Amino acid sequence: MKLVAEDLMESDVITVQKDLTIEQVNQIFSAEKISGLPVLDGNSLVGIISKTDINHALSTQSMTKHSLISEIMITDIISVTPNTDISEVAVIMTSKNIHRVLVCQQQKLIGIISAMDFVKILQLTKMTQTKPVAIPA
């Protein structure tokens, strides 16, 4: 059975608005036990923010916890469609050195896949004692 992004993605996506501060987003990261979030402007996807982005901005730029995430978010959004094969998702994530990829359909955010989702697949595969899905390097 071929697995696609839709099979692996989390469809209950937590998002933030671009006018939140670094401090507010860090509180969401802590409360939700996550490390990255899609960023919206109203209902439109405009970026993605991670703990790494925030830590880098705080340590190398003149940002403070009161700075807006819109000043540091990544706007070059890397996304896949629900029908993208998970091996292709893995190649995208490793080649771009990213920990999460957004799943979009007709330019609408419908899910997110994180590196941890791949770990969960490997764990399930081991539990069912079937051969793991081949993910190209």
Image (cartoon, rainbow, N blue to C red):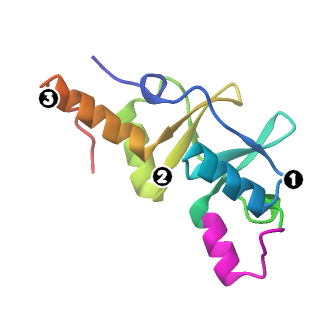
Q: In which quarter of the image is residue 38?
A: top right
Residue at which label 3 appears: 131
Say few, some or many: other residues with alpha carbon within 10 Å of mark 2 (under 14 / 14 to 19 / 20 or more). some
Residue at (65% x, 81% y) in the render: 59
Residue 77, percent from left and from top = 65, 48
Give me the residue at 63% from left, 65% from top: 53
Above or below: residue 6 compared with residue 25: above
Residue for badge 2: 99
- The circle on residue 19 is 1
Dot placed on the residue nearer the N-terminal end, 3 or 2: 2
Q: From this view, report whether residue 60 is shown above or below residue 119.
A: below
Q: Is residue 50 left or right of residue 24?
A: left
Q: At label 3, which amino acid type do we have?
A: Lys
Q: Is mark 3 on a helix, strand or loop?
A: loop
Chain part drawn in magenta: 53-66
Q: Residue at position x 83%, y 62% from top? A: 68
Residue 25: tell me if it is visible: yes
Question: Callout 1 environment at 10 Å: few (<14), some (14 to 19), or many (20+)?
Answer: some
Q: For residue 75, which quarter of the picture? A: bottom right
- Give the camera-side residue of 64 and 88: 64
